[in-house]
């Protein structure tokens, strides 16, 4: 295991390059001296282990960012459990097995902060994994991601593969999913506040508004992924967060402030709150020398610009 690992002159596969995180990693890699490999969904089904193995043997990536996953917000997670558990297990199994077989030098697997117990001590340290029951609204996704971390670890242990895992907190930014039912809270709020600004009416948020979440701008996450790819080589997964959290009701107010809209905020306790608080301890990554650069208000401003340039045009 060599650190720092150099990407210079390497063939680097970003699996999941159409997704929010994958596309941010591709943007970040554009400034690096490496050859970025991508493959579209129509050309390669990432849940098909045999096809993935064939593709990896043909294209011989040397480094892999495993950002491909079935993702979604609190409602999508609870209403599509098979998709979140099965698809994610298949994708990560196919790519990790392919990476070992094709001799990939280094691989970074992306998990999620929902792998931690529902009532984990805050801020959540990496060691909290598997110390308590999960949050039921996203346990399908969490179990798939925990299996991914363990599989990466197992390949490291049994075959000596340099596979590492990063656990990002709730991410947002350009390329986000703004669908009202399937999205995470931040893109949902950008859309809802935009609609209230254009058409009038209150901003209705799900749940009680009291849960607290930590948010990280996706380009910061991509930067952290490259940092870890270069500078980290160990079995333990590493938290990637911003270091501060905010209550959902306050987040709604902040989005309103950034978008320039003042009005009523309604709560909807019939919708799930999910885990009460999810703030990660980022000290391990900070001690290595990495920190985020985009604060929440600036990140919301940039996400709103991306929203207006895309979906927001038709609303
Ligand atoms: O972002 P979110 O869907 O997922 O919801 P989680 C965060 C909080 O925002 C919950 C509230 O308390 C929601 O009830 N919320 C308020 C809303 N209004 C809305 C809205 O309009 N849309 C949405 N989506 N939420 C996810 C997991 O958990 O975290 C995923 O489901 C993943 O698996 C992700 O791990 C990072 O933060 O609760």
Image (cartoon, grey):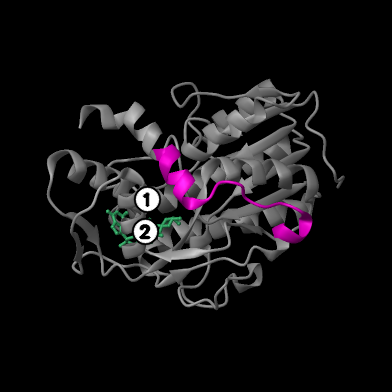
Residue 301 part of the magenta-drawn span: yes
Mark 1 CB near ligand 1 (8 Å cut): yes
Residue 102 counted in the magenta span: no
Where does label 2 land, which residue? Answer: 251
Which contiguous range is marked in magenta? 285-303
Give the image location of residue 77, x and y in percent.
35, 55
Instruction: Please say if 49 is above or below 81.
Output: above
Ligand 1 rendered quadrant: bottom left
Query: Which tag, 1 or 2, sits closer to the chain's start?
Result: 1
Q: Nearer the viewer, residue 17 or 235?
A: 17
Q: Which residue is mark 1?
A: 186
- Camera-nearest residue between 122 and 53: 122
**Residue projecting furthest to the right:** 2
Cβ of mark 2 under 8 Å from ligand 1: the answer is: yes
Q: Residue at x 69, y 38 (%)?
A: 99
- 48 is higher (above) or lower (below) than 187: above
- What secondary structure prevails in the magenta region? helix
């Amino acid at each position: 295991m060599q650190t720092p690992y150099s990407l210079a002159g390497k063939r680097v596969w970003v699996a999941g390059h159409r997704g929010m995180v994958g596309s941010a990693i591709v943007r970040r890699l554009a400034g690096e001296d490496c050859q970025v490999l991508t493959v579209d969904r129509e050309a390669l089904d990432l849940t098909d282990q045999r096809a993935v193995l064939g593709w990896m043997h043909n294209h011989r990536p040397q480094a892999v960012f495993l950002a491909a996953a079935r993702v979604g917000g609190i409602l999508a997670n609870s209403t599509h459990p098979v998709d979140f558990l099965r698809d994610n297990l298949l994708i990560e199994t196919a790519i990790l097995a392919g990476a070992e077989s094709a001799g990939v030098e280094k691989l970074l697997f992306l998990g999620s902060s929902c792998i931690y117990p529902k009532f984990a001590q805050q801020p959540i340290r990496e060691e909290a994994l598997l110390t308590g029951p999960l949050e039921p609204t996203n346990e399908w996704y969490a179990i798939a991601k925990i299996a991914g971390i363990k599989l990466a670890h197992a390949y490291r242990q049994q075959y000596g593969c340099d596979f590492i895992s990063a656990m990002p907190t709730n991410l947002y930014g350009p390329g986000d999913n703004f669908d009202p039912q399937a999205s995470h809270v931040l893109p949902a709020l950008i859309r809802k506040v935009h609609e209230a600004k254009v058409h009038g009416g209150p901003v209705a948020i799900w749940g009680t508004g009291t849960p607290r979440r930590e948010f990280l701008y996706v380009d910061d996450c991509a930067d952290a992924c490259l940092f870890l790819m270069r500078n980290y080589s160990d079995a333990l997964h590493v938290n990637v967060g911003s270091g501060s959290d905010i209550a959902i009701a306050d987040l709604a107010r902040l989005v309103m402030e950034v978008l320039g809209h003042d009005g009523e905020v309604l709560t909807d306790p019939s919708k799930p709150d999910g885990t009460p608080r999810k703030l990660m301890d980022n000290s391990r990554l900070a001690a290595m020398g990495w920190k985020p650069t985009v604060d929440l208000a600036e990140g919301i401003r940039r996400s709103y610009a991306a929203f207006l340039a895309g979906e927001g045009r038709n609303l």
